[in-house]
Image: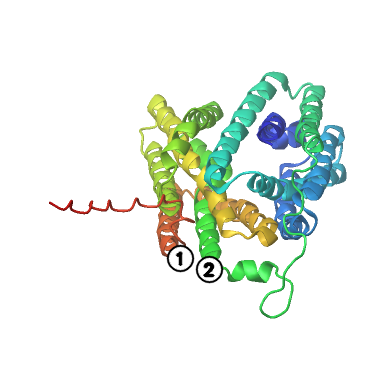
Amino acid sequence: MLVGTLFSALGRGLTLPFLFIYLTDVRHLSGTTVGLLIGWFGLLTLAVSPLSGSLIDRFGARRVVMPALLIEAVGVGSLALVGNTWQAAAALTLSGLGASTIWAGQNTILTSITGEQERQRVFGLQFALLNLGIGIGSATAGTIVDTARPGTFQLIYLLDMLCYAGPFLILLTLPGVGRRLVETPTLNANGRKRGYAEVLRHKPFRRLIIFSVLLTVSGYAQLEVGFTGFATKVAGVTPQIIGYAFTANTIVIVLAQLLVIKKLQGRSRTRALAAVGGVFGTAWLVLGLAGYVDGGNAVLSAVIVILFGAIFAVGETMLSPVSPALVNVLASDELRGRYNALSSMVWGMSAIVAPVSAGPLLGAGLGGVWIALVTVGTLAASLVALSLRKLITPEQDGRLAEPAAPVAPAPVPA
């Protein structure tokens, strides 16, 4: 399963940085149209995710993920052939339908084939491989694509399509993996089938979702618009420096992830999540310093922007193993697909909210206000994470049981 993650990440990296460039500069669609198409992709994944969770619980992750991989493959492959708006919309629709299911399904499968003590390590390793694959794919595509040669873009989308064959074939050779976790669904106290209503009534999980929304809206989701907009318009760095910042981010994740996994083992998950908010907030404050550097000192601005990427990566290495492990320790087997689907929905929701908050502020020249808001948002997420600690057991929090106090030996009779 981890090898499959690496394959799909390689394909994702090949195309991730170039969709806007491809559709505008090569296929000559307007920037407004492309923005709406990308927004449609995000909205679609957000809308379909709840359905995917129900299907995973009802039929098993295997029967949902394998068709989704094929649909995603056809979608990204079709992008190589688009020539107008409706064709691009159709290709992105197929891609969105597949993407809305794969992540929740893969997390459900990984949970089903690992024990509680190893899940945190596995999710961390999955994230490291994901970043390694995206980094290698992006670097490879950067040496291939040329806007004067449309065939180079067609090539990377066809390669992306082929990369989805990796996880599909791996699942095909593992017939016992990803089956339905509970064969006979139980009824709740009202005599009804258990579903999303029960998941949403789960107070610790609800608190975890609030944390995830705050952290993602103020963190991850701000990278594409907020970070790049602030770095170019306020700090005045070139797009090349932004590329170096993302490269630094990937290098830190790949090199540090295994060490961080080891350090987190047996420690409080909620405190680790709170620390993530602090690290993300520190990263935004560091980026804010770049906006106050004298415009003539381009080197210092560049260094600060690249340093932001490295600091942000430290928080990611802490978040990636802990968050999905906590989601799945709170979930029951019968509703595991739904828990993972709601957790993945946070990303789609944040991708819609974040640009709306960052774009107008940066456009109005209020970069400092934007830095303050995202910093406060990450710190608020830290407080929510700490409040979660009292709602869960020490075992769910990942804390090792404290050793019992040694018993004094009985006195030996004289």
Where's residue 144, x and y in %?
72, 20
- Look at mark 2 in the image and give the residue it sits on: 203
Which numbered disc, 2 or 1, marks the residue that appears first in the sequence?
A: 2
Q: Is residue 47 above or below residue 230?
A: below
Q: What amino acid does circle 1 point to?
A: Leu
Of 298 and 91, nearer the camera is 91
Residue projecting furthest to the left? 414
Q: Secondary structure at mark 1?
A: helix
Q: What amino acid does circle 2 point to?
A: Lys
**Residue density around tag 2, few if under 14, some if 14–19, many if 20 or more, within 10 Å:** some
Q: In screen coordinates, is 176 left or right of 133? A: right
Residue projecting furthest to the front? 414
Where's residue 222, x and y in %?
54, 47
Q: In screen coordinates, is 185 left or right of 306? A: right
Image quadrant assignment for residue 14 = top right
- Look at mark 1 in the image and give the residue it sits on: 391
Q: Is residue 36 visible?
A: no
Where's residue 219, x and y in %?
50, 48
Q: CA distance from mark 2 to mark 1?
A: 8 Å
**Residue density around tag 1, few if under 14, some if 14–19, many if 20 or more, within 10 Å:** some
Residue positioned 86% across, 46% down in the render:
86
Q: Are marks 2 and 1 in contact (CB under 8 Å)?
A: yes
Colour convention: rainbow
Q: Is residue 360 above or below residue 188?
A: above
Residue positioned 69% across, 80% down in the render:
190
Q: Secondary structure at mark 2?
A: helix
Of 316 and 78, nearer the camera is 316
Where's residue 201, x and y in %?
59, 71
Image quadrant assignment for residue 1 = top right
Residue projecting furthest to the top? 143
